[in-house]
Image: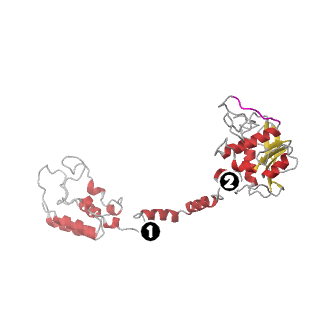
Amino acid sequence: MRVRPAVAVVLAGVLAGTGAGAVWTALGNQQSDALISPAGTAAGAQPRVDDRASRDDERDVLAEPTSEAAAGDGSGVSPTAVSGSGSDSAAGSGSVLSLNPLDIEALPDIAAARPQAGDTSTSGAGDAAGLAADDPAQVAELGASEAVAPVLPEGVDEVDFAAGILSADVPESGTGGLDVVPGSSPAPGAGEVSTVRIQVEQGLDVDGTKVADLVLTTLNDPRSWGGDGSRTFARTDAADATFTVTLASPSTVDRLCAPLDTGGLWSCGVTDHAVLNYLRWVEGSPNYGEDMAAYRQYLINHEVGHVLGHRHEQCGATGSLAPVMVQQSGATIRCVPNGWPRP
């Protein structure tokens, strides 16, 4: 069977940019006897080949590609060239009965393969760059996330920073003056409202707002003194606060806690005033190890407990949970450290 002219037509269409799909579609539409057995031909029968008709069809194909190929799905092969009605196949499979041995799907569609303007899909790096360039919102979001990331001071980790610590250095004394942290917040719970004023000694490298936030968050935790619903805590900067919580240097703590002997090491809770030693705030306690967040919660709850009228307690059985009013800042205790009145 003479099929070489059809191969030439396909190759010519490829080189001209028409695409193999367009050529085969047109040939299929013309029902070329040289390519497809006509309906009703018996199995094994040899169809008649009309060379002149084939040459005319080939000229038509080169002159006018079919609209099906132009409107195809971009695969380079028209549906007409790969499927039939069922009568086109002696076996009734619905596929093309006989094609040139040359594999059509292996022929490149030059027009489809030609890169289009602005197409960066051939490069992985181009994809990433294109996404960043074409999505200003994403770029802005990434920039914003980088902008708000805190730069931690040397020797200060994220937990310390959240507690208001801006330097790992602990001065023996500050100026002795006390700054009230401005601002207020309502009590979040039910029960009797206690207003709390926060002070920080001048000369300490501390973010007072972060200190105030940590104090109020701790006191209003369900495990703290208001966990039974009897009390809740509001922040204020007014002089008539129910009590004051002060963060101060060791020497100032000794002065504010007198006549109690804090020895530059400890904190205290006296009438209407919880005084937190900045040395302990920064360095913690051997009982809590590296868990500075838990120790600071203990320090707040323990000293405010004194302000609320609670006295020191003792450990129970070895390995039992310590009551919050057990002294836990100094020597190692035999019970398990605990910073909450209602753990």
**Mark 2 crowd level (few <14, some 14–19, many ≥20, 10 Å Cα):** some
Nearest the eye: 64 or 251: 251
Q: Is residue 263 visible?
A: yes
SS for callout 1? loop
Inspect the image, locate mark 2, and give the three-letter code of the amino acid beneath it. Answer: Phe
Q: Is residue 234 above or below residue 334?
A: below
Q: Main secondary structure of the magenta part?
A: loop
Tell me the quarter of the image containing the C terminus. Answer: top right
Q: Residue furthest top?
A: 317
**Residue 263 placed where, x, y %?**
79, 46
Q: Residue 118, which numbered label?
A: 1
Q: Quadrant of residue 115?
A: bottom left
Inspect the image, locate mark 1, and give the three-letter code of the amino acid beneath it. Answer: Gly
Q: Which residues are magenta?
A: 309-316
Residue 315 falls inside the magenta stretch? yes
> Which label sits in the foreground, 1 or 2?
2
Nearest the eye: 226 or 278: 278
SS for callout 2? helix
Is residue 259 found left or right of 300 in the rendered image? right
Residue 304 falls inside the magenta stretch? no
**Residue 134 placed where, x, y %?**
51, 64
Q: Is residue 213 above or below residue 310?
A: below
Q: Earlier in the sequence, mark 1 or mark 2?
A: 1
Which residue corresponds to the image point at 36% horizontal and 61% vertical from the top-left? Answer: 71
Q: Residue 161, which numbered label?
A: 2
Indicate the colouring scheme: secondary structure
**Residue 323 placed where, x, y %?**
72, 33
**Mark 1 crowd level (few <14, some 14–19, many ≥20, 10 Å Cα):** few
Which residue corresponds to the image point at 19% horizontal and 46% vertical from the top-left? Answer: 91
